[in-house]
Amino acid sequence: MMTAEQLMASHKANVETLFGLTSKAFEGVEKLVELNLTAAKAALSESAQNTQASLSVKDAQELMSLQASLFQPLAEKTAAYSRHLYDISAGTSSEFAKAFEAQATGAQKQLANLIDSTLANAPAGSESAVAVMKNAVSAASTAFESVQKAVKQATEMAEANFNAVTTQATAAVKTPAKKR
């Protein structure tokens, strides 16, 4: 059993983790708001410039040329915005994953200590039950580690796919612009 001091230390650590994660969540929201404000300011400024440019065109050919020249920067800015948005999201979720991993590791250690102390005081003749219990805990730990590795690999793969799609989309917009 856990002593009162251990219980209080565990509770304190959990509260500190909660406040730390809350702080990280607010940092992520702050970054997101800052990104959106910056994007909105830039869009407003560009809209004013584009409107002024549109009002100064003399014929349909010039208007078509102006519109065509606006597509590539728009696609590049959209890709950059998406990249910043992804970075903010990935950074925040990474902090949460680290905290979860640390909590899970601590819980595994506490469970292992509890099992070890329980098994040390097990009555004679219960060796087979002790072995079954140890195997079950070992299998659960191995399964948890496998899940953690799979999640990390999936995250890395998703990031690589996102980067590839962003690069391809930006390149696809640049290619037709160069052919004109």
Image: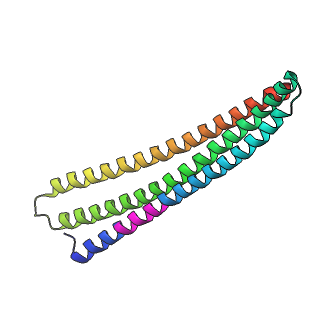
Indicate the position of residue 48 as horizontal and vertical percent values: 75, 42
Residue depicted at x 45% and y 56%: 96
State left or right for residue 28 relative to residue 119.
right
Indicate the position of residue 23 as horizontal and vertical percent values: 47, 63
Q: State which quarter of the image contains the N terminus.
A: bottom left
Q: Quadrant of residue 114?
A: bottom left
Residue depicted at x 57% and y 53%: 33
Q: Quadrant of residue 59?
A: top right
State left or right for residue 113 relative to residue 128.
right
Towards the viewer: 17 or 58: 58
Towards the viewer: 1 or 168: 168
State left or right for residue 31 relative to residue 79.
left
Q: State which quarter of the image contains the C terminus.
A: top right
Q: Residue 178 in magenta? A: no
What residue occupies the far bottom of the structure in this picture? Answer: 5
Q: Residue 20 in magenta? A: yes
Magenta stretch? Answer: 15-24
Residue depicted at x 49% and y 52%: 93
